[in-house]
């Protein structure tokens, strides 16, 4: 299968290194790798180098040996070409280093993301495995609440008043068509989303917090309305695309793993790969690149590099913790991932939200019985670390409470709500309240702890005419902007984006079955019930995801 | 890897990932091309084109094995194979050229690399290719065979050009694959999201419903 039009792909002859190339790509991060693959399939002669012995650059997922070397490197005063710094690493003894894949810039993929379309279109998705991420929790009043991301959740929620439910329903109805109804929000375009939600939809603080921080995954309540609406809609429209979850993650690592897939695709199209090879110098005028072994390469078109960026004053603080607990209490059934958000002002005055991505062993990143927690905040310096440690403490308390086996919880009648079809639903709020008073007997064992700082970088003010800079991964947990950036760079080389990944695969693959017989979903049926109780919005669109295109 | 049983008959169907390794120009891609398409191209310069190839063989009346074959795509040239390449590989063919003594040494180092990077119970076959150039032979059969048996590898001398021993090589691998454990492991490890199957109610996530 997929033996692409081999005639147009130039074959480098084996054993002799190319002494010239059209485009030299330096760094194997996600954006560069997408560009390399797009160019290679378009017929450009690509040489792709990385100074590291691993793929992924600033997006890499590392085993423990690589992680140790990486922390040493970013802490070294001699290293000035990385946005990372200030790493503190603890690793417990006797861990098998190869059984771990630690993401240095963890990301998740919404099912309505342009990157997913590109992965499918380019067939790179065939090299990867994606797992569902359906659990989004918000930390409120010392417990983790599941985010009501669907109408069903809103309906069954016990801590929402009828009035709030009505306002929420009204907002959800609006937000799926927000971009077609600018009259509703235009005056709030650049104003804080929290203001818009309060004034226009009469929403209360807890709902605003969940919408902004857990659903839109934004860090600050003053995030602009336009951006926030886009992100809220994306969450809702991503539900039910592949199942009862809005997002996914790639197994064995996020951006670095996807980058590997694009690199393999580029190699299949004829790009040449050399890891562990440094670019010693590049002469922008002559286009001559000198490698660390003295080899010279004539670059006829462009150098695309993710190195040489300048740090700006903004930074984020990250923490990684591997715990000896499977953390399944936080995951939806059959899943191995959750997002936990600590909104502003929930951790002793934190200014920005703290986001935590929790992955269990089903992610392939940690062995059975363990989980990895990725925490991050846009708060910088000492305050940033303090916020993260507080969040870590809360997570530890919570997982110990929830996972203790000898704790029995009596469900009383008042804790149960019944759906019109008779299905009982236990209120997670009551559950959370009861658990709050419980003191666990055991403590949590940390197998790895890492904190570090990531600076936001900018390209140098005067790039050379042959040099194109690739921005570092954004501080966002979503892949937003990656495809757009890759396309812009591609256009910088070829002058157009029209043929970006327009590959005519000679399809011989018998596996490529048509879109057929998707599994039945039942959520729509359950969601029909709201009319009776809520009265005045009879035709609330049950299928939020239904009619949308990207 | 995947194993499924057809409920109406007793046929068993299993899929395995096979990776190719070996020095450049020993004929890795040619071996696969012979196996999959029964073709040979004298002027084939290096690996071009295929994401991975698939080939199905019927082991016996009730067992069908499908190989998902990953070629190196040239990434072995500068030791730049991604971890993704080795991951979950069930079997590997390490190829050397019987007319190049040094290529067997390279093959040995690839075997070591596999033992370091791949699944513990990976099935490895050593293939001495270019048997059609027997007159220029530099590697004696006995020497390679001895190495293979002490390292627990399957061993064949093959010719992608004439086709000699190519099917035999892949069939021997298929016979060694653990069909029974494959099926039980399948049940405990749920597969990832099938991106080609979005729900009926939502429009396809890809352009014009393409599921490639």
Image (tube, grey):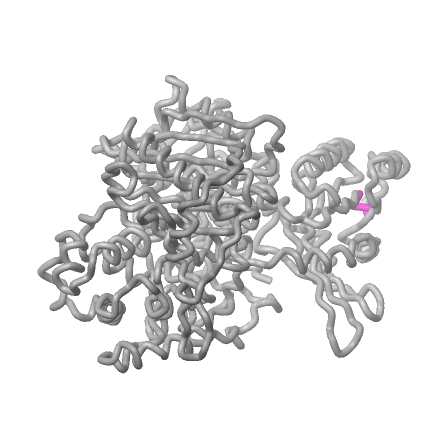
Q: In the picture provided, is B108 more to the left or to the right than A284?
A: right
Query: Residue at coordinates 53% horizontally, 39% vertically from top-left?
Result: A101
Q: Position of residue B81 (x, y in %)?
A: 59, 40
Is residue A389 shown above or below A419? above
Q: In the picture provided, is A212 more to the left or to the right than A254?
A: left
Query: Residue at coordinates 49% horizontally, 29% vertically from top-left?
Result: A277
Query: Residue at coordinates 18% horizontally, 56% vertically from top-left?
Result: A225
One can see residue B40 in this view: no
In the orientation shown, which residue stands out farthest toward the right?
A: B142
Pick the residue in front: A103 or A362: A362
Residue stretch in magenta? B127-132
- Dividing the picture into quarters, in which one does residue A388 lie? top left
Quadrant in the picture for the N terminus of chain A? bottom right
One can see residue A92 in this view: yes
Is residue A294 shown above or below A315? above
Query: Residue at coordinates 62% horizontally, 33% vertically from top-left?
Result: A96
| Residue B167 in magenta stretch | no
Is residue A248 shown above or below A468? below
In the orientation shown, which residue stands out farthest toward the top?
A: A77
In the orientation shown, which residue stands out farthest toward the left?
A: A187
Q: Position of residue A416 (x, y in %)?
A: 42, 67
Pick the residue in front: B107 or A65: A65
Q: Position of residue A444 (x, y in %)?
A: 51, 36
Q: In the picture provided, is A548 more to the left or to the right than A328?
A: left
- Dividing the picture into quarters, in which one does residue A507 lie? bottom right
Q: Position of residue A33 (x, y in %)?
A: 44, 45
């Amino acid at each position: 299968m997929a033996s692409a039009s081999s005639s147009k792909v130039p074959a480098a002859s084996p054993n002799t290194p190319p002494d010239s190339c059209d485009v030299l790509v330096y760094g194997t991060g996600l954006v560069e790798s997408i560009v390399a693959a797009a160019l290679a399939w378009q017929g450009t002669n690509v040489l792709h180098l990385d100074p590291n012995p691993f793929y992924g650059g600033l997006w890499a997922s590392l085993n423990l040996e690589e992680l140790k070397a990486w922390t040493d490197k970013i802490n070294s005063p001699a290293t000035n070409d990385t946005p990372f710094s200030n790493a503190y690493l603890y690793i417990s003894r006797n861990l098998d280093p190869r059984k771990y894949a630690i993401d240095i810039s963890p990301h998740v993929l919404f099912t309505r993301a342009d990157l997913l379309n590109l992965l499918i279109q380019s067939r790179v998705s065939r090299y990867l495995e994606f797992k569902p991420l359906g659990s989004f929790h918000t930390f409120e009043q010392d417990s983790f609440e599941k985010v009501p991301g669907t109408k069903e959740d809103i309906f069954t929620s016990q801590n929402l008043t009828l009035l709030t439910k009505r306002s929420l329903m009204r907002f959800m109805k609006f937000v799926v068509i927000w971009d077609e109804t600018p009259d509703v929000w235009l005056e709030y375009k650049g104003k804080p989303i929290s203001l818009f939600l309060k004034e226009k939809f009469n929403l209360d603080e807890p709902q605003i917090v969940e919408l902004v921080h857990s659903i839109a995954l934004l860090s600050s309540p003053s995030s602009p309305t336009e951006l926030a609406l886009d992100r809220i809609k994306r969450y809702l429209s991503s539900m039910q695309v592949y199942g009862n979850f809005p997002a996914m993650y790639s197994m064995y690592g996020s951006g670095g793993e996807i980058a590997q897939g694009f690199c393999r695709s580029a190699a299949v199209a004829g790009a040449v790969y050399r890891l562990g090879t440094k670019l010693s110098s590049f002469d922008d005028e002559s286009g001559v690149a000198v490698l660390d072994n003295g080899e010279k390469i004539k670059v006829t078109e462009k150098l695309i590099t993710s190195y040489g960026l300048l740090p700006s004053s903004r930074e984020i603080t990250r923490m990684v913790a591997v715990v000896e607990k499977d953390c399944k209490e936080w995951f939806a059934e059959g899943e191995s991932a959750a997002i936990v958000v600590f909104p502003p002002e929930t951790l002793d005055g934190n200014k920005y939200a703290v986001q935590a991505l929790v992955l269990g062993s089903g992610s392939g990143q940690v062995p059975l019985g363990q989980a990895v927690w990725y925490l991050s905040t846009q708060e910088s310096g000492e305050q940033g670390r303090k916020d993260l440690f507080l969040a870590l403490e809360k997570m530890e308390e919570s997982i110990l409470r929830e996972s203790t086996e000898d704790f029995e919880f009596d469900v009383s009648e008042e804790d149960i709500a019944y759906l019109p079809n008779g299905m009982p639903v236990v209120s997670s709020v009551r559950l959370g309240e009861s658990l709050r008073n419980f003191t666990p007997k055991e403590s949590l064992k940390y197998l790895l702890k890492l904190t570090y700082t990531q600076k936001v970088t900018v390209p140098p003010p005067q790039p050379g005419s042959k040099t194109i800079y690739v921005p570092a991964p954004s501080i966002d947990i979503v892949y937003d902007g990656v495809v757009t950036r890759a396309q812009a760079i591609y256009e910088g080389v070829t002058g157009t984006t029209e043929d970006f990944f327009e590959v005519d695969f000679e399809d011989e693959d018998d596996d490529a079955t048509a879109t057929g017989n998707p599994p039945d979903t039942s959520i729509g049926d359950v969601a029909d019930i709201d009319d009776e109780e809520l009265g005045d919005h009879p035709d609330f669109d049950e299928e939020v995801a239904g009619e949308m295109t990207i | 890897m995947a194993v499924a049983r057809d409920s109406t008959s007793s046929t068993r169907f299993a899929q395995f990932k096979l990776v190719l390794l070996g020095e450049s120009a020993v004929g890795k891609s040619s071996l696969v091309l012979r196996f999959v398409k029964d073709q040979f191209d004298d002027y084939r310069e290096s690996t071009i084109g295929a994401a991975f190839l698939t080939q199905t063989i019927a082991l016996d009346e009730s067992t069908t094995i499908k190989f998902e074959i990953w070629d190196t795509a040239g990434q072995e040239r500068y030791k730049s194979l991604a971890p993704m390449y080795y991951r979950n590989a069930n079997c590997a063919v390490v190829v050397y050229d019987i007319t190049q003594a040094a290529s067997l040494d390279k093959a040995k180092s690839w075997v070591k690399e596999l033992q370091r990077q791949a699944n513990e119970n990976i099935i490895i076959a050593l293939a001495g290719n270019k048997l059609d150039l027997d007159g220029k032979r530099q590697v004696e059969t006995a020497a390679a065979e001895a190495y293979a048996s002490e390292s627990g590898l399957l061993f064949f001398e093959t010719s992608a050009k004439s086709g000699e021993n190519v099917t035999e090589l892949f069939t021997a691998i298929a016979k060694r694959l653990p069909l029974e454990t494959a099926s039980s492991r399948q049940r405990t490890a749920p597969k990832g999201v099938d991106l080609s199957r979005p729900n009926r109610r939502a429009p396809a996530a890809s352009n014009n419903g393409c599921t490639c």
